[in-house]
Image (tube, rainbow, N blue to C red):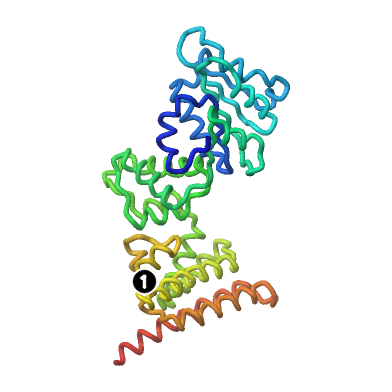
Amino acid sequence: MKIEPRQVDAFLKKPHPTVRGILVYGNDEGLVAERAMALATTVCPDLKDPFRVVDIAGEVLKGDPARLADEFSALSLMGGRRVVRVRPAGEESVTALENLAAAGTGDALVVLEAGNLTPRSQLRTLAETDPRLAALPCYPDTTGVLEGLVESAARGAGLGVEADALDWIVQRLGGDRGQTRNEIEKLLLYKEGDPGKTITLDDAVAVLGDTAAVGIDNVIAATFGGDEAALDRALDRVFAEGGNAVQLVRAVQRHADQLHLVASHAKSGNFESAMFRARGLPRGGPVRQRFELHLKTWPLSRLSAALSRILEAEIDCKSTGLPDEAIARRLCLGLAQFPKSARTSQARR
């Protein structure tokens, strides 16, 4: 049985009673561990209970393939349903899982934790196709899921999250559920005892801020906003802290790409659709307002020219032998001239 994304939440709370073995797998190790633990605790809330919880390494099953079926049928000495945890599990566990599926009576729940398994994996194929088994994939969280995790954790602590702060946090969370949980916990701990009941962008930057990333954000804001004084300061900060010129140029390119995407769709009347499709855009607050201001300032033709100029700068960084920092500075200062001149022209009208 293959657990589809829409079924995951319900399945984690109450696995189907006919399922005796569940394979939890994927390249998000933190999410694999979290979901496997959630499934195990539906049977035994205390996973340290030596009478109801058995831990087995997958390698052990290679030499003892009957072990899972035996554990499934065994009764707890102290009563209560038992859970068998297999970790890590791999292809060496296939025969043991086949024996579990074919076993007679028993009521233990077997939870196997595996890494990333390809569609050709025998272990995965068995768990997906046998009705007495289940396969639960775990892949890196989407933006929507990450937003839900942050907001849910904040609500649980009696806190709200500003839209800007939420967008900024989500963009900086990794692809591992365990690390994501740790970062969120750090943020909640920081707000503990704070009379302010809302997580602000300043809070997020203080706890999770990568100073180089913050500096690059400031460079982008000043470049596309035409603020040369602020741009000089932001560039100085980025390079003083060891910022990478190519990384900076690519960040400028991503922003220009987003502007170009939205501007292209807006031209044909699909502005809201384009805003939705442009990945990573803030939903509200000052950052969203800044993006919309850049849209109004930069026409489509100028954005196309800017993208060509950015591409040339990246090629120059990699091929000319000139100082990368100088190339990045020249690019940003050159781009900043357009919004500055546009404001001057409007003032003269």
The residue wearing badge 1 is 270
Image location (x, y in percent) of residue 206? 41, 51
Q: Given the image, on which type of amino acid does mark 1 rest?
A: Asn
Looking at the image, the residue that sits furthest to the bottom is 349
Figure quadrant of residue 121: top right
Would you call the spot at circle 1 few (<14 residues within 10 Å), some (14-19), or many (20 or more)? few
Question: What element does badge 1 sit on?
Answer: loop
Identify the residue at image location x=46%, y=60%.
214
Identify the residue at image location x=51%, y=31%.
36
Figure quadrant of residue 84: top right
Image location (x, y in percent) of residue 20? 53, 24
Q: Is residue 206 left or right of residue 101?
A: left
Identify the residue at image location x=60%, y=68%.
246
Looking at the image, the residue that sits furthest to the top is 77
224, above or below 273, in the image: below
Return the residue nearer the eye: 1 or 146: 1
Q: Is residue 236 visible?
A: no
Q: Is residue 93 visible?
A: yes
Return the residue nearer the eye: 271 or 347: 271
272, above or below 32, in the image: below
User: Which quarter of the figure is the C terminus placed in?
Assistant: bottom left
306, above or below 12, in the image: below
Return the residue nearer the eye: 228 or 200: 200
Q: Is residue 87 left or right of residue 294?
A: right
Image location (x, y in percent) of residue 323? 65, 74
Identify the residue at image location x=58%, y=29%.
112
Return the residue nearer the eye: 320 or 288: 288
Image location (x, y in percent) of residue 130? 57, 31
